[in-house]
């Protein structure tokens, strides 16, 4: 699946229902040039078969791992959506993300990751 040039989407939570419908079958996802996308929270954690994720040319994307968490929420929910992708995601590409200062802390949960670009 490739999502591109959609300037209206600010968060993947806006299209979460689409991800839920293909949660066990989608193996590859590319998100390219979505100029208003600020967050991948609220969608990726449903993609339990995702093997390859490419995030490219996303001017506003940030990895705020506490986004969407309520104060006092259990420690188990930190690092989402990365924890849910731990055993399936083999390849992660991050390219042309000008607001990305650091890799997301939750990336340490990606135990099946073989390629990081």
Image (tube, rainbow, N blue to C red):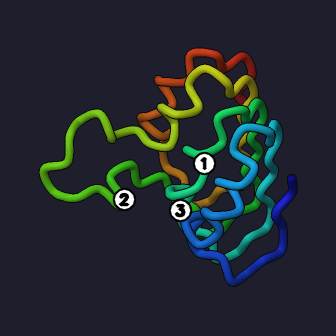
Dot 1 lies on which element? helix
For mark 2, give the secondary structure.
loop
The answer to whether 38 is drawn above or below residue 62 in the figure is: below
Determine whether, in the image, residue 88 is placed left or right of residue 83. Answer: right
Q: Of circles 1 and 3, which is in front?
A: 1
Q: Mark 2 points at which residue?
A: 67
List the single residue furthest toward the bottom.
Answer: 8
Q: Position of residue 94 (x, y in %)?
A: 70, 44
In percent of width and height, residue 29 lies at 79, 47
Closest to the observer: 49 or 68? 49
Instruction: Report x, y in % for residue 12.
Output: 60, 64
Asked where in the image residue 53 lies, by quadrant, the reply is: top right
Residue 117 appears in the picture as rendered: no
Q: How far apart are marks 3 and 2 (CA)?
A: 8 Å
Do labels 3 and 2 touch, CB within 8 Å?
Answer: yes
* Mark 1 neighbour density, 10 Å: few (under 14) some (14–19) many (20 or more): many
Q: Earlier in the sequence, mark 1 or mark 3?
A: 3
Left/right placement of residue 80 relative to residue 15 reads left
Would you name the residue on which mark 3 appears?
39
């Amino acid at each position: 699946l490739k999502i591109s040039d959609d300037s209206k989407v600010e968060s993947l939570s806006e299209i979460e229902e689409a991800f839920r419908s293909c949660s066990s079958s989608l193996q590859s996802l590319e998100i390219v040039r979505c100029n208003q996308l600020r967050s991948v929270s609220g969608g990726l954690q449903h993609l339990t078969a995702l093997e390859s994720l490419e995030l490219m040319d996303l001017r506003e994307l940030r990895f705020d791992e506490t986004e969407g968490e309520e104060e006092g929420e259990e420690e188990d929910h930190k690092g989402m959506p990365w924890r849910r992708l731990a055993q399936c995601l083999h390849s992660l590409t991050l390219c042309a993300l000008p607001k990305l200062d650091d890799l997301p802390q939750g990336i340490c949960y990606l135990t099946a990751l073989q390629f990081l670009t």
